[in-house]
Amino acid sequence: MIDFDKGLERWDHPEIVSRLFFPRREFSGEPNHLKAKNYFVEMDDGIAIGCRFYPAQSNGPNILYFHGNGETVFDYDYIAPLYQKRAINLFVADYRGYGMSDGSPSSGSMIRDAHCIFHSFIDFLHDMNFSGNLFVMGRSLGSAPAIEVAYHYQQQLNGLIIESGFASGRNQLMRLGMSHLFRDVQDPIGFGNHLKIKEVTIPTLIIHGDEDDIIPVTEGRMLYDLSGSQEKYSLYIPHAGHNDIMIIGLDMYMKSIAKFTE
């Protein structure tokens, strides 16, 4: 396996971090009507990452979900019922500095923490007696930790879902306006999504809005084309942007996830 840590060293430049992460702290009890459960993942350095589990059915599919850079787990109180309605269990993880989590976010810590979060996700489901298939999903920035988990643990997973994800490190730098920091780097790998997904052979679903003006649909199409899976699917939602994809294409969005995780 390729060691991607070096590629992330420069991604923790303060200018990049300030444009990549938009953390907000929030604290919330467990909403009874969703039967949700707060859960904390302890990292080796003492940082605790807040997560929230939305149960639906003990033998239903289980999705470990990494959200976008301007969201927190609590935003999924409004989305989780759509998954629960389809008997899908949703486990949403925050990043450092987000929601109930300690610390401050960075590119490197987000990727390193994804490993511990995945192992804790497995242990949590075992302790709760949830026995269904395992999936990892990432939206926007969350595509990076999701692909990282799929790259390393595909033997334990039944599928990967990417929504509004990015592929190329160089293109990401251009969107952030940070290309000047990498003038001396021929191929800025960054998170390495475009390289890792080549090695991911488990079933893969790529979802993207056709009119996404933040992460263009060309990035989603690139992830699909590069995917090493022999069982890959795509959904490009007409007229949808980056943040209205579930509003414009809700029915086809949820149907594609339900069918993929069956």
Image (cartoon, rainbow, N blue to C red):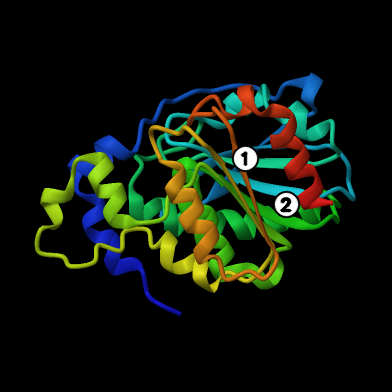
Residue in the foreground of this view, choosing between 97 and 149: 149
Q: Is residue 129 above or below residue 232?
A: above
Mark 2 secondary-structure assignment:
helix
Q: Amino acid at mark 2?
A: Phe
Q: Looking at the image, which residue is at 21% across and 57% down?
A: 10
Classify 10 Å Cα crowding around label 1: few (below 14), some (14-19), many (20 and above).
Answer: many
Question: Is mark 1 in CB contact (under 8 Å) with mark 2?
Answer: no
> How far from the left and from the top, in percent, is residue 250?
69, 28
Query: Which residue ends up furthest to the front in the rendered image?
Result: 238
| Number of the label disc, if any, that sits on residue 92 | 1
Observer able to see residue 46: no
Query: Which residue sits at x=72%, y=51%?
Result: 124
Among the two numbered marks 1 and 2 on one chain, the one whose residue lies closer to the N terminus: 1
Find disc 2 in the rendering and name its residue.
124
Q: Is residue 72 left or right of residue 251?
A: left
Is residue 219 something that shows in the picture?
Answer: yes
* Residue 143, horizontal then vertical, whole percent: 50, 49
Query: Residue 20's quadrant in the figure?
Result: top left
Secondary element type, mark 1: strand
Position in image of residue 149 (x %, y %):
55, 61
In the image, 216: left or right of 60? left
Q: Crowdedness of circle 2 by 10 Å Cα count: few (<14), some, many (20+)?
A: some
